[in-house]
Amino acid sequence: MQVSSQQIKAIQRVLLIGGLIMLINFVAFFITHSNSILSDSLESVINITAGLFAWFSLHLAAKPKDINHPYGHGKIEFFSAGFEGSLIFLTGLVIIGKATYNLIAPAAIHNLDTGAILAGIAGTTNFFLGKYLIKTGKKHNSITLIADGKHLQSDTWSSLGLVVGVVLIYFTKIVWLDNVFAILFGFIIIYTGYPLMRKAYGGLMDEADEEILQDVIRVLNENKQPQWIDVHNLRLVQYGSNYHIDCHLTLPWYNDLQKSHAELKKIETLISKKFNQKVELFIHPDPCVEASCEICSVKNCSFRKHPYVRSVEWTIQNVSSDKKHQLNKEH
């Protein structure tokens, strides 16, 4: 899998700036002893830990395919995103636990005005860092960078709520609100972590990506050739920023090997162009059968058993099926 120097540099920049944000957050916590601000401080620790793991995963994903990893090392990106999501989830639980304890055994808090300013600076910086990572991640189709970017941007909204809460406590002097806000932020953090875990574990388990499948099928439908009688048994697997597609293509049974290969090559070129060479295709040619005649638009076929009736539009349902398409047995 190809990992650009821009991706590596993006992670390195985020690690550097993230270290400064972590320092700011912990300074804010130590001068305030606020559990709400502690939630932001622990989040910044996660950002650094996840960033280091993301940096490692991108380096590993960049390694070429080998005999032990014939599809490359791109799956590590899903593991990285899952690791980050799990850390976020656990941090939310820790924050809720500590804040609940301090509701029972309150601790004094101080200097909330300074703490609010520092938290606001950290949160604003996280927003722009997240925006930068998401933009870079989408450009290179990197789930690691996108996950990191969304995580940082979610930190911004919790930081914004934190600042509002701290200011409210500062003016009302209702100290127990600090723990209530911390519990609220803990649940927000858990809510942020779950989608990352869900997507990452889905990728590790080779869950079908319906959005990408729809894209592939749309391109095939728009460029369908008469020789392409049907596409079935299609499987799409993501390895980091790359995709691997297996499918069966039904062709006229009388085609010689050279002609069949030419048709397969057309599909490979079409899909590779659409996905900027980030797709590896393994296409198995199948010979047509008598039931294929009704959906086959090849003209002047001397072997036709039944007249052509109509074409069958390809959908996720029928291209994912392991059976050839028929008018009386559409999937």
Image: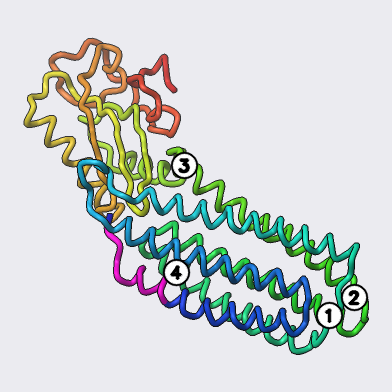
Q: Quadrant of residue 301?
A: top left
On whether residue 328 falls in the magenta region, the answer is no
Q: Amino acid at mark 2?
A: Val
Label for residue 175?
A: 2
Question: Is the C-beta separation of discs 1 and 2 under 8 Å?
Answer: yes
Q: Identify the residue position indicated by label 1 in the image.
A: 109
Residue at (37, 52) in percent of width and height: 240
Q: Earlier in the sequence, mark 3 or mark 4?
A: 4
Label the magenta part by its dominant secondary structure: helix
Q: Considering the numbered disc 1 on the image, is that residue within a helix, a strand or a loop?
A: loop
Q: Amino acid at mark 3?
A: Glu
Q: How far from the left and from the top, in percent, is residue 318?
A: 41, 27
Position of residue 144 in the picture relative to residue 254 (left or right): right
Q: Identify the residue position indicated by label 4 in the image.
A: 135
Q: How far from the left and from the top, in percent, is residue 133?
A: 46, 70
Distance, label 3 to label 2, CA atoms, is: 48 Å
Q: From the image, which quarter does the C terminus lie in?
A: top left
Distance, label 1 to label 4, CA atoms, is: 39 Å
Distance, label 1 to label 2, CA atoms, is: 8 Å
Task: Give above or below for 235 relative to 212.
Answer: above
Q: Identify the residue position indicated by label 3 in the image.
A: 210
Viewer-nearest of labels 4 and 2? 2
Task: Give above or below for 185 relative to 283.
Answer: below
Q: Quadrant of residue 244?
A: top left
Q: Amino acid at mark 1?
A: Ile
Q: Earlier in the sequence, mark 1 or mark 3?
A: 1
Taking depth in this image into account, of 6 and 182 the one nearest to the observer is 182
Distance, label 4 to label 2, CA atoms, is: 40 Å
Q: Amino acid at mark 4?
A: Lys
Q: Earlier in the sequence, mark 1 or mark 2?
A: 1
Q: Which residues are magenta?
A: 2-12
Q: Considering the numbered disc 3 on the image, is that residue within a helix, a strand or a loop?
A: helix
